Structure formats: C-alpha cells, structure tokens
Image (cartoon, rainbow, N blue to C red):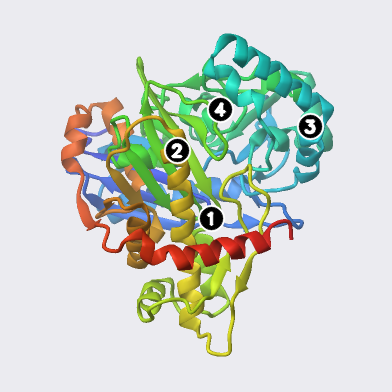
Amino acid sequence: MPCEQQEGAAAPARYVVGVDVGSTVLKCHVYDQAAAVRGSSCKKVESLYPRPGWVELDPEVLWSQFVGVIKEAVQAAGLHMRQIAGLGISTQRATFITWHKKTGKPFHNFISWQDVRSAELVNSWNKSLLLKVVHLIFTVLHFLTGSDRYLAPSFFTFSTQQTSMKLSWVFKNIYEAEEAARRNDCCFGTVDTWLLYRLTKGSVYATDYSNASATGVFEPFTKCWNPTLCNLLSIPMSIYPPVKDTSCNFGSADCEIFGVPIPIMAVVADQQSAMFGECCFQPGDVKLTMGTGGFWNVNTGQHLFASRRGLYPLIGWKIGEEVVYLTEGCMSDVGTVIRWAQDINLVTSVDETEKMAWSIVDSQGVCFVPDCQVSVKDPPLCASFMGLKPSTTRNHLVRAILESVAFRNKQLYDIIVKKVRIPLHTIRADGGVSNNSFVMQMTSDLINKRIEKPANVDMSSLGAAFLAGLASGFWTDKEQLKKLRQVETVFEPQKDLEEYKPAMDTWLQAVKHSLHW
C-alpha cells in the first residue's frame, strides 16, 4: 500500500494500540485514554511440529498475522491509522530466529521456548566436568565476596527452555547460520526483534531489557549479553542486537505497511508486560498469570535477587534511569492441560470446567499429575491420572485437573515466600485461566491471601499499550495508570488450609510416583 498523502487537518491521535504475540493466540486491542477497549482482533498462533519435541513458528505466517490483527482491530474500532498515537508490542519470550544480516533471509523457522531439541546437549553439559569446575569457581567467588552476582552461577544448570542451548544447537546443525556468524553476517532476534526489523524494513535492529533478560543469555547484574556463557558455548557475541529501554521511541512502522508511519513506542516481554498492565509498580506487588503456562512474578524494586532454586531474576522494565527487577517462578502446562481436556472430549467447552468442579465435594481421591516441572530444577514428571475407581466420573477427572493447577500455585507461592526476602503485598491475577472461579478460589484458600482479578484479563496487551502511551505522552505517569485499573472480582480466603491437607498430601504422593518415569 503506498503512503497516504496528508490532506487538510490530520485526525487527532487519541488512541494507542497494544499487541500481544502469545504462544497460542495473537491479540490486538485499541485503547482510548480511559484504557477502554475500542476495537479488537485475535488470531490463533499456529505452531509447527516437524519432529517429536520440536516446536516452531513460521516467521512469514506470524508476520502476516501480526500486521493483520492490527489492521483489523483499528478497523473494528472505526478508526483510521492516523489516529494511532503509538504502538506497543508484547511478545512471548525466548522464542528466537536467526537471519542473514545483508539479505534479511531467515536461516530457520522461529524455535519456540517450548522446543526441546536441545535435550541431549542440555544433559551432556549438566553432567560435564567443565560445568562442575564453573560451579566450584563461582562458589569460591561468592564465599570470598558475598556478592549475589556469583551465587546463581554457583549452582547454574542448563534447561531446554533457555535460549542458549538451542542457539548452540543452531550453530552446530545449521551450516549457513554458523558460516554467517563467522563472517559477522548473522543476526539473532527474539520475536520482538524480528517484528521491529520487519516493521521498519530493516532500519531498526534492537530488543529491550525485559526480552533480553528472559533469554538466559543476558546478564541482569551487568545489563549486558553474557560473554562468559557465550564463550563457553562457542556462540559469537556479534550476533546479538543492541538493547534499548522498554518504553521509548523505537522508530516508526514503514508507511507502506499501514498507509501511515505509526510510531513504535514500546517493546516488552509478555510476563513483564502483564506485570505493568496490572500496575504492580511497588516492591512486593505480585502478579499471577495463568495462561498457556503459569507465572508468579514479584516486583523486587531496585534489588536484583540472585537465582534461587525454582526462582530466577528478570528485568521487569527499564524506562530512562528507572530499572525495575522481578523475581519469577513458573510452571508449564496450565491452560494447555485444560484445553487438552476439551480436545479429548472430557469437556465440551473450557468454560464448563468450573461448573463441573463445583458440582462435587471432592475429586474422590483422583489426582492429576501434569507433564511438567514446577521449576526447571525439578526432575520430569509423567502426566497421569491416579486413584481412578469404577465410580469415577468426568466431573472427578476435571476437578482433579483444576486442583492440580491450584496445588502447583501453592507450591510456587511457598517457594517465593521462603526465598524472596521482602514483604508481599497485593496479588493480582490475569490470563485466561484466571476466569476459572474454582481455580482462583482454591488458590486463594491455599495461600491464605486475597487475589484481585481485573475486568480485562488481557494484561500483556494492556501493559504494552500503557508503556507505549507513557512514551508518546498519551498518558502522563504511573499514577494516572493506577486510576484506570478496573477490578472485576476479589477472591478472599474462605476455607482453612487444613481442609485441603488430605487432598494435597494425596496429590504430592501422586507426584512422587510420577518422578523419573
């Protein structure tokens, strides 16, 4: 589409666009100054599974869908592209691609954060003598200096979720990428970097601090790409993009894409974006996202907690001189498991699961153990139902699935309370599974805390819009954003933890039986 000529007075730019490129869904919302949604569009993200354990995304399909949802959302709002003050982009983390610096041609599809092709490399490195030596060196350094910077490497282990091992796999298995890297002609980018590159037709090559810190290749203490890790894995430092503030002017989308040059005012990782959308701006604020996976994030302010087993540090966002750190714990397969129940016709729709769970007093001793780890340090579990009886019904199976989500929330919360040495305040939930009242109420009971659920659970999209709006002057400051928050439901603890103890003890026994399957 050719760039439009401006005729007469331009329509005032009174709206911001927030796009969330998630693992399963790509959503776009157009917001007005009251943060009300004026128009939306949504497309399913199509994952590719070329081999067992491999999970990929076609970059051209993702690009087409990304442009499409923005155009559709603006059209649904009855607006013109000229009325958009800024674009904020939230993306799934640690999914990456490499491409040729001169031609822009990718060497492979996006390799998803869910991909486990590097499993053999991970196992080999974790058993290696070299890693044991690294542990010893950093243990001594931590002992001598007392610096938290040396604590995490003292027990660091690789996992398939980290970008580093999959990137090492790329350079070992894709000759064109390895050859280009040797000639300094290889570009690495997470989803945000690729979209920026495409939006600006190659003129902007960058990422932000939140996305960089989620790759596992970026050192949050020094705020730089980690040369020690890259040297260890023989990954050239020349491939990485410059890192910019989360909320700033990244340039404008080329006018041929949308007809006018839309300013790109924020780029942010999805969990950090949800944290910002929930207005968790104070140290001790907690955000619980239950979408494809489950993520607990704690705002630790200007204090960066070293990695503890089950938890890891992230940069939440950087805006000018302000750098906010988070501590995160995650669990895989939350919404995925509930969707699976629908796929195998255990339920006709995801929405009916809470009614089925509430319709019975307990799961009758049935336990569901998901194919997951509460943290990357845990051994793998075998997905299974246990405790099945002739009297077991679909309702018992569904309740067992939902209980497993709440039990894992309890486990992660307990780790956070034990390891994060700051008082925890407000807990705010978002993500599709937060619409499930059974999971939310049971989680509130188990952790004995009040949990707020917002009216709009698409917090990653809203957070990206908030960040873009601040950078463009659409909104003035965080205090204004706080006033725009709308809480739909508050879950207060209703049962004593002791009432759940027999069921949770039984579930923990089931987990033990599933270890090392």
Which of label 4 and label 2 is nearer to you? 2
Disc with the residue nearer the chain's start (4 vs 2)? 4
* Three-letter amino acid code at the position of disc 1: Val
Let me know if residue 373 appears in the view.
Answer: yes
* Three-letter amino acid code at the position of disc 4: Gly
Q: Secondary structure at mark 3?
A: helix
Q: What is the spatial separation of the Cα atoms under label 3 and label 1, in whole angstroms? A: 27 Å
Q: What is the spatial separation of the Cα atoms under label 4 and label 2, in whole angstroms? A: 46 Å
Disc with the residue nearer the chain's start (1 vs 4)? 1
Disc with the residue nearer the chain's start (1 vs 2)? 1
Residue behind mark 4? 202
* Three-letter amino acid code at the position of disc 2: Lys
Which of label 3 and label 1 is nearer to you? 3
The label shown at residue 45 is 1
Disc with the residue nearer the chain's start (4 vs 3)? 3
Residue behind mark 2? 418
User: Crowding near pointer 2: few (<14 within 10 Å), some, many (20+)?
Assistant: few
The image shows residue 118 at horizontal and vertical percentages of 75, 42
User: Crowding near pointer 3: few (<14 within 10 Å), some, many (20+)?
Assistant: some
* Three-letter amino acid code at the position of disc 3: Phe
The image shows residue 438 at horizontal and vertical percentages of 35, 67
Let me know if residue 261 appears in the view.
Answer: no
Q: Secondary structure at mark 4?
A: loop
Q: Residue at x 52, y 56 (%)?
A: 24
Q: Residue at x 47, y 47 (%)?
A: 412
The image shows residue 230 at horizontal and vertical percentages of 71, 22
Disc with the residue nearer the chain's start (2 vs 3)? 3
Q: Residue at x 48, y 42 (%)?
A: 415
In the displayed structure image, the side of residue 358 where residue 54 appears, left or right: right
